[in-house]
Image (cartoon, rainbow, N blue to C red):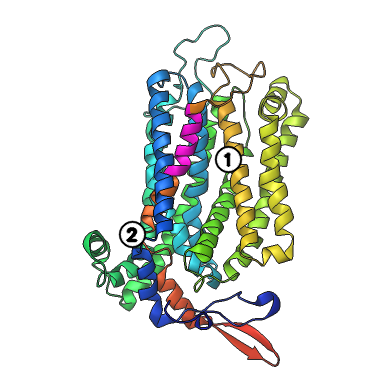
């Protein structure tokens, strides 16, 4: 903003200094629009790096497809791992905005659009998902003989027409459509207001997407109801699709792997990493993006408590999974534990525990770090590293068990290390997400303008006796 910092910074001293910020309502639109349309050199550099990584991924994918084809799932284990990581982190991100709208949390206003923009990545996930469908072994064993199963164990009991390919793909399409609808409905007021100043492609896009919006009371009521309904539906849908995915592409690939804890553990890790990634994006915006007038420490402070709870909840699910198989003592269960945890992939499992639990837990129980902007962001980065290791371990192992039609895992296979093309595909998956998000952030503003302006009407700093406190209005 053009005005000085004291107009933005909320009151507060000591531990609460800089906790809340209050932008000038009349300047929010022009300032955020200017930041959205600007293209600083640092942003161009980030776009270039993301594009290079995405290109490496395309090269790795093309060489893997031409050399190994899609006849066997083994060569695609690391591709499945990076896809799962991208889906895990970005799939649940739009839910963050929906969940905190349900709770009417004022501190979530600056992060709403940051989380909703990941809906665009959800569309890209549909394309990235198709090679996995091609590499998946068929449910019916084409070479059934001896002790092999005629039908591979999957969640499709009656194997309906089109299973698993059609139904799996429809799940991802439905999830993407729902998340895009949330983004569109949330961004409509901002796009309608930006039509007057936008030019070229943006002006045409804003007119097409928000030409119907005039800001009447009835439209605001419809938008509020629509976001509530879409948010509730998305919450149910993301859990269902994650259950389908982790069951279909992990458990059903390992003979006799039956576990009711893995899908909820996957979902909890998804919530943990999505929130962690959003905090990282917020920190970058606050530190280097010029959004310090909109982002105090309150979003980091409040989200850190939720991040701590999710960290503990993931650890509980991991313990529940491990202890069930450990006490079962069946040979096949012991082989699965050895394969995924204690033998060939033990280093990855220990590193996964370190970054997913120990590091964020120790950081988030320390109050000075939790009240800072960088502490919760660093804990979120640690959770992301742990999730990447979890997916590398789980899917590289699941896709390389050998015979997927065995009755049970009769031996412990060796670990499969990535080659150069696997590394290219992993880097490419990260690059594609960054590239799509950076481009999207130049079409839709990273700050939800209407929500921030609404928040300025409901919040202010005031004094009582000798203290200075945040005063919140309750409009409903």
Q: Is residue 36 left or right of residue 378?
A: left
Q: Is residue 25 left or right of residue 269?
A: left
Q: Quadrant of the N terminus?
A: bottom left
Q: Earlier in the sequence, mark 2 or mark 1?
A: 1
293 drawn magenta: no
Q: CA distance from mark 2 to mark 1?
A: 29 Å
Q: Is residue 466 left or right of residue 235?
A: right
Q: Identify the residue at image location x=56%, y=71%.
A: 296
- Asked whether the viewer can see residue 245, the reply is no
Residue picked out by circle 1: 388
Q: Is residue 59 above or below residue 293?
A: above
**Residue 292: x and y, percent?**
51, 70
For residue 202, what is the image quadrant? Answer: bottom left
Residue furthest to the front in view is 41
Secondary structure mostly seen in the magenta stretch: helix
**Residue 256: x and y, percent?**
62, 23
Q: Identify the residue at image location x=34%, y=69%.
A: 190
* Residue neighbourhood size for the residue with mark 2, other residues' Cα within 10 Å, grouped as few (<14), some (14–19), many (≥20): some
Residue furthest to the top in view is 146
425 drawn magenta: yes
Residue 443, numbered circle: 2
Magenta part of the chain = 421-432
Disc 2 and disc 1 in contact, CB within 8 angstroms = no
Viewer-closest of 216 and 161: 216
Viewer-closest of 399 and 185: 399
Q: Identify the residue at image location x=49%, y=10%.
A: 144
* Residue neighbourhood size for the residue with mark 1, other residues' Cα within 10 Å, grouped as few (<14), some (14–19), many (≥20): many
Mark 1 falls on what kind of element? helix
- Asked whether the viewer can see residue 315, the reply is yes
């Amino acid at each position: 903003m053009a005005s000085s910092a004291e107009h933005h910074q909320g009151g507060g001293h000591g531990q609460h200094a800089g906790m809340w910020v209050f932008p000038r309502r009349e300047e929010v639109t022009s300032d955020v629009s200017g930041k959205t349309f600007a293209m600083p050199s640092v942003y161009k550099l980030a776009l270039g790096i993301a594009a290079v990584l995405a290109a490496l991924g395309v090269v790795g994918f093309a060489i893997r497809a031409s050399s190994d084809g899609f006849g066997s799932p083994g060569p695609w284990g690391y591709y499945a791992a990076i896809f799962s990581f991208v889906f895990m982190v970005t799939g649940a991100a739009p839910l963050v905005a929906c969940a905190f709208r349900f709770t009417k949390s004022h501190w979530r206003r600056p992060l709403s659009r940051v989380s909703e923009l990941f809906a665009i990545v959800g569309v890209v996930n549909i394309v990235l998902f198709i090679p996995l469908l091609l590499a998946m072994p068929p449910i019916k064993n084409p070479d059934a003989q001896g002790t092999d199963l005629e039908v591979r164990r999957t969640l499709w009991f009656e194997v309906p027409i089109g299973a698993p390919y059609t139904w799996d793909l429809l799940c991802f399409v439905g999830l993407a459509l729902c998340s895009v609808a949330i983004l569109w409905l949330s961004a409509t007021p901002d796009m309608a207001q930006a039509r007057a100043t936008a030019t070229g492609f943006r002006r045409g896009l804003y007119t097409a997407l928000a030409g119907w919006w005039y800001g009447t009371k009835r439209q605001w009521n419809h938008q509020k109801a629509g976001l509530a309904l879409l948010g509730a539906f998305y919450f149910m849908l993301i859990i269902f699709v994650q259950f389908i995915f982790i069951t279909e592409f992990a458990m059903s690939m390992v003979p006799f792997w039956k576990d009711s804890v893995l899908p909820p553990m996957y979902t909890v890790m998804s919530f943990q990493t999505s929130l962690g990634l959003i905090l990282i994006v917020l920190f970058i915006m606050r530190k280097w993006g010029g959004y310090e007038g909109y982002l105090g420490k309150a979003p980091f402070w409040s989200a850190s408590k939720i991040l701590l709870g999710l960290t503990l909840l993931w650890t509980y699910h991991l313990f529940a999974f491990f202890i069930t198989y450990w006490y079962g003592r069946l040979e096949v269960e012991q082989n699965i534990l050895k394969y995924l945890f204690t033998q060939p992939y033990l280093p990855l499992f220990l590193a996964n525990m370190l970054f997913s639990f120990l590091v964020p837990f120790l950081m988030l129980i320390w109050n000075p770090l939790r009240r800072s902007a960088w502490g919760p962001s660093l804990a979120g980065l640690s959770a992301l590293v742990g999730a990447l290791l979890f997916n590398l371990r789980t899917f590289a192992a699941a896709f390389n068990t050998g015979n997927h039609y065995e009755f049970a895992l009769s031996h412990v296979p060796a670990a499969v290390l990535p080659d150069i093309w696997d590394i290219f595909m992993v880097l490419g998956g990260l690059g594609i997400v960054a590239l799509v998000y950076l481009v999207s952030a130049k079409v839709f503003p990273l700050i939800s303008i209407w929500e921030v302006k609404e928040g300025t009407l409901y919040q202010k700093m005031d004094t009582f006796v000798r203290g200075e406190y945040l005063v919140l209005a309750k409009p409903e």
